[in-house]
Amino acid sequence: MLADIHVVLSHTSHPGNIGAAARAMKTMALSSLSLVNPQHFPHADATARASGADDILAQARVFDDIDAALAECQLVIGASARTRSIPCPVISPAECARQACAAGNSGRVAILFGCEQSGLSNAEIDRCHKLVQIPGNPDYSSLNLAAAVQIICYELYVAASAGNDTVDGPEHTMVTAGEMERFYRHLEQTLVELDFLDPANPRQLMRRLRRLFNRARLDENEVNILRGMLSAAQDAVKQQS
């Protein structure tokens, strides 16, 4: 289960936090670390803070953008301490671990952490199926990045150690984040052609539609059906013009 669960750190500003996150991962038997546009990496501070988890740093994959980092993942859970104006399902660390281990039986899972200063951006949350929030002091709930990684990795280790009887894998092949991005581009293009979406004044339409479909967690057959419907709508528009 844990082999296909990836910790993704986005726009990390301090290399020491990358090393400390790697150490947190190794203590809980996770090994797949992805970095999105880190400010400094590789770096001596990362190696020093890793304290023996150098192998995780050496194997870490570095990406230029979030879509590339998540492209092969079927479930993306973002860690966020803040509530958002457009709701996204929020789960506890234990439930995050249960769902991640269940999905890890059949595909890749990403646990996404934002930069130290501001956390996940709206664009990054748009890529998440769920958000996980670590409960704490409501007057001071902001955790250090590596501490947050440690808590989530601990819950993942506990869930995986409980055995396969505690988690049920999905019945169908879930789509990857890359396939969903292609669907969203197709959806947006079709809505523009139908004059339902004004590209000059899109407001929050696509963001709300992303949250809707992310909550549904579509499988491959469902996405193929939806894209077939979109193509049929585009063909009808062409015939009328």
Image (tube, rainbow, N blue to C red):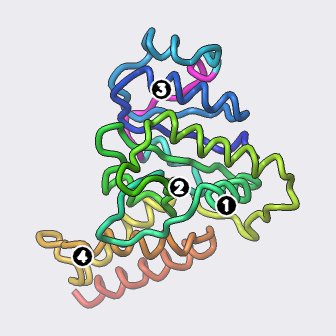
Q: Residue at x 43, y 53 (%)?
A: 137
Residue type of the residue flagged with mark 4: Val
Mark 4 vs mark 2, foreground winner is 2
Badge 3 local density, few (<14 within 10 Å), some, or many (20+)? many
Amino acid carrying label 1: it is: Gln
Residue 77 numbered mark, or none: 2
Residue most toward the bottom?
A: 240
Q: Give the magenta part as a residue range.
A: 56-66
- Badge 2 crowding class, 10 Å Cα cut-off, few under 14, some 14 to 19, many 20 or more, is many
Q: For the residue labelled by badge 4, is the local secondary structure a helix, a strand or a loop?
A: helix
Tags 2 and 1 touching, CB below 8 Å = yes
Which of disc 3 and disc 2 is earlier in sequence?
A: 3
In the rendered image, residue 136, in percent from the top left (x then y), is placed at 48, 53
Q: Is residue 145 above or below residue 77?
A: above
Q: Earlier in the sequence, mark 1 or mark 3?
A: 3
**Residue at the image position 24 percent from the left and 76 percent from the top:** 192
